[in-house]
Image (spheres, helix red, strand yellow):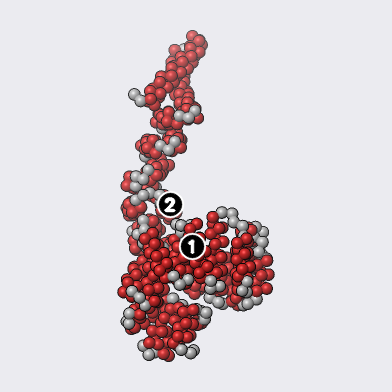
Amino acid sequence: MDYYGLMVHTHRLLMAALAAALLTGTMAVVAQPVAAKGNAQRGATAAKTAETESNAALDAELFYEVLLGEMTIQSGDPGSGYALMLEAARRSNDEKLYRRAADIALQARSGDAALQAANAWKEARPQSRDANRYVLQILVALNRVADSAGPLKQELAQTAVQAKAASFQALPQIYRRVSDKTLAAAVVEQALAEDLASPTTGAAAWTAVGRMRLLANDKAGALDAAQRAQQLDPISDGPALLALELLDARTAQADAVAARYFAGKPSPALRAAYARVLVNQQRNEDSLQQLQAATSEKPDFAEAWLMQAALQFQLKQLAQAQKSLEQFEALAQAVPEGDARRAGLSQAYLLHAQIAERRGDYEAADAWLNRIDSPQDMFSAQSQRAFLLGRQGKLAQARALLQSLPVAGPDDERMKLLAEVQLLRDAGQYREAYALQGKAVAQFPDDNELLYDHAMLADKAGQPEAMERLLRQLMARQPDYHHAYNALGYSLAERGIRLEEAKELIQKALEFAPQDPFITDSLGWVEFRLGNRTEAARLLNLAFKSRPDAEIAAHLGEVLWSLGDKEQARSIWKQGQQLNADNDTLRETLKRLGAGL
C-alpha cells in the first residue's frame, strides 16, 4: 500500500472508531428511559435513532476527512490533501468535493491527478456539464488533443441551440495553446459535424472551423470555411470577421467574402474594422469608402470621423480632412473628461498640425501642437515639432530636440532612433540615416522590419552591395519575407544587371503575396528590362488597376511610350501626378524622356 493509501486507510479506522463512539454513547443515553415505554414504541424509537445517528456519524467522518485534507494542504502536502479530498468525494458523491480535489491537483501542477479526479467526477455524475468541462479543459491543457474529442462532443450536445454560436466562438481560444493545431482543427470539425449541416447553426459552426484552420495556418482551408459559412447565412457577421482575419494574414481571396458582406448593411463598427484592414493593405480609397458609409449611417460615430480625417489627409484631401476633424471635435465635447477624450483630441491636434504644415503654415502647426497636454502623446507632439523644424531647414535643431526627449524603456528608445532616421531621410541625408539605422538594428537585432529598412537605406545611400547582403540575411532569417525578394529583384532590374535572377526573385515574392500590385509592378519592370515590352505593359496595367500609384504610373507610362502609344502614356502620367506630383520616379521619368505634360 502506498503512502497516500496508508494515510486514507488509517484515517478510515480513526473515523470508524469515532463513529462507533458516537453511536455507542447515543444508544446508552437512549436506553435509560426505555423501561417506562411499551415494547413496540421502544423498537421503533431505537431503529429511528440508530438510522439518524448513523447518518450523523457518516457526516462527521466526511467533515473530519475534508477538514484534515484542507489542513494537510495548508501544511504544504497537497498530494496527501488531494488523496483525502478525492476519497471524501467518492464516498459522498458530492460534486463540490470532486471539483475541490481537481482544483487541488491543478494548483499543485499535477495534471494527471487533476484528470483522475475529473474522470472520477464524470464517472459518478455522467451528465454533469461541470465534470465534463473539467475533463475537456484538463485534456487540452495536457495536450491530449485526440482524447478531447469525446468530452467536446458531449459539451456541444448539451449546449442549447441559442447558445451554440457563443460556444463555437470560444473553441479557438480553448485550443490555441496545443502543439498540434492541425489535429485540433480536425477534432473540432468532427465534433461539429452535425451542426455544420444545420441551417440554424451551420454558419457559426463553419466560422469556428475556419478560425481553427487559420490557427493551424491552413489559410486555404479557412477561406473555404468562410465561403461555406457565408453561403449558409449571407448576413452573418462571423464569416465576414473571419474574412477580415484572413485579409490581415495576407489572404487576398478573402476579400470577396468581405466585400459581399459589406455590400449589405453591416454595423458601422464592423465597417470601421474593415477600414482598418484595408488601410493595412494600403487600400486607402476603399477604406475611406467604408468610413464614409459608417459616418453616414451613424453620424455620432466619433472614432470613424477621426479615422476618416487621417485617411483624407493621406489622400491629400486637406479641406475634407479639416471638416472631418471638426465633426470629431464636436462629438468629443460630449465625452466626459478622461484619458480617452484627451487621447482622441491629441490625435486630432496632431492631424491639424500636419494639415497646417502641408499648407506651409508652420506657425499654425506649432500652435496646434501646443494644445496637446496628454503625457502619452507628448512624444508624438515633440517628434512632429522636430519634423516642422526640419521642413524649415533647421535640421540641427530638429535632431537636438529629438535627442533630448526622455525615454522610459526600450520602446521609447526605438521610437526616438527611428524618428531621427526619418528626419534625416526626409532631408535627403541618406548616408547619415543609414548609419543611424544601423545603431537601431544593433540595439534590436531580432527586428526584421528594422533590418529591411536598413537595407532600403543602404540602397539610398549608394551601397547596393550592402543592401543585397542585408536582404539576403533577412531572407535566411525569415524565408517568407516577400518584401526582401521583391526589393532585391527590383534593385537588380533597376540597375539592369542579373535580370534573370531578378525575375526569379520577384516571382518568388509573388508566391508569398500573389495579389500584391507592387510586386506585380516589379515583375512588369523586369520584363521591360528584358525586352518583353508587351508582357510588361500587361503586367503594369494589372498593377495600376489594382493599386493606382504614382510610381506604377511612371513605369507603365514609360512602357507605353516605348511602344509608341504616347497619348496613353501621357494620360497615365497625368493620373500619377494627381496621385503624387512629388514622386521621384515619376519626375525623373518625365525629365529623362522629355515628356512634357
Residue 538 drawn at (x, y percent): 35, 81
Image-quadrant location for residue 543? bottom left
Quadrant where the image shows the N terminus: top left
Between 289 and 229, the residue placed more toward the observer is 289
Image height of 113 relative to 147, above or below: above
Q: Which residue is mark 2?
A: 173
Q: Residue at x 34, y 72 (%)?
A: 502
Marks 2 and 1 close (CB-CB < 8 Å)? no
Left or right of 162: which side holds 410? right
Q: Is residue 513 visible?
A: no
Q: Which residue is mark 1?
A: 438
Q: Within 10 angstroms of label 1, few (less than 14), some, or many (20 or more) residues?
A: many
Image-quadrant location for residue 498? bottom left
Q: Within 10 angstroms of label 2, few (less than 14), some, or many (20 or more) residues?
A: few
Residue 482 drawn at (x, y percent): 38, 66
Between 123 and 347, the residue placed more toward the observer is 347
User: Quick one: which residue is furthest to the top in this view?
Assistant: 35
Left or right of 221: which side holds 409? right
Q: Is residue 424 visible?
A: yes
Image-quadrant location for residue 301? bottom right
Secondary element under disc 1, as helix, strand or loop, is helix
Say what amino acid the circle numbered 2 marks.
Gln
Tell me which numbered mark, 2 or 1, is placed earlier along the sequence: 2
Say what amino acid the circle numbered 1 marks.
Gly
Q: Residue at x 43, y 78 (%)?
A: 552
